[in-house]
Amino acid sequence: MKLDRALGLLREVPDFPLPGVLFRDLTPVLADPDALRAVVDALQDKIHPDTQVVAAIEARGFLLGAALGYGWRYGVVPLRKPGKLPAVTHRVSYALEYGTATLELPADSISAGQKVVVVDDVLATGGTAAAACELVERAGGVVTGVSVVLEIQGLGGRDLLAGRDVNALLTL
């Protein structure tokens, strides 16, 4: 399946999670095995060759990160919401398009100098991705890039990640 056809499966859900927000749902892409393969392969094509670890952002980033880790032999580190990890090294709070949130990094999951790509489904305001990069760097890792399926350009997320290698398969 070609990437453009796979990305055409993205679903728009109005007024989720709050009125006025147009949520871009990756579920139909993930549910289609050929679409999933096309998206994961395209993400891999954009990842720096020295990368050793995928920092996968909760929750859809977990699915993409696991596929990348398995397919290309990267380690995978989940970046989680509070209260989900038994041992936490660092936590960062940040602003979202519709509120605030916090991400946590599991203890001893990233070594000093490890090359890490941050992976998520959508780049919107950039707060989540910027927090993820901060967590990786606090642990001593080196962020090789930020890779997402969809970038919502009008929300300025790329601006918050200035100076970083940001790759999106689709920009709206």
Image (tube, rainbow, N blue to C red):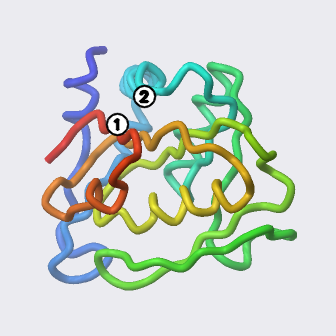
Q: Quadrant of residue 133?
A: bottom right
User: From this viewpoint, which residue is outermost toward the top?
Assistant: 1
Left or right for 146, reference 124: right
Which circle, 1 or 2, is nearer the viewer? 1
What percent of the width, then of the height, locates residue 164? 40, 45
**Label whose residue precedes the other's in the sequence (1 or 2):** 2
**Towards the viewer: 123 or 90:** 90
What percent of the width, then of the height, locates residue 171? 19, 43
Q: Residue at x 80, y 70 (%)?
A: 88
Which amino acid does the dot numbered 2 rest on? Answer: Leu
Q: Please, is residue 98 above or below residue 172 in the view?
A: below
What percent of the width, then of the height, locates residue 117? 55, 39
| Label at residue 167 | 1
Task: Confirm or deny contact between disc 1 and disc 2 (CB under 8 A).
Answer: yes
Q: Which residue is mark 2?
A: 43
Q: Please, is residue 31 above or below residue 78 in the view?
A: above
**Towards the viewer: 59 or 9:** 59
Q: Please, is residue 38 above or below residue 145 in the view?
A: above
**Towards the viewer: 114 or 61:** 114
What percent of the width, then of the height, locates residue 31? 43, 37
Helix, strand or loop at label 1? It is: strand
Which amino acid does the dot numbered 1 rest on? Answer: Asn
**Towards the viewer: 139 or 21:** 139
Helix, strand or loop at label 2? It is: helix
Category of crowding for the residue at label 2, using alpha-carbon neighbours closer than 10 angstroms: few (below 14), some (14–19), many (at least 20): many
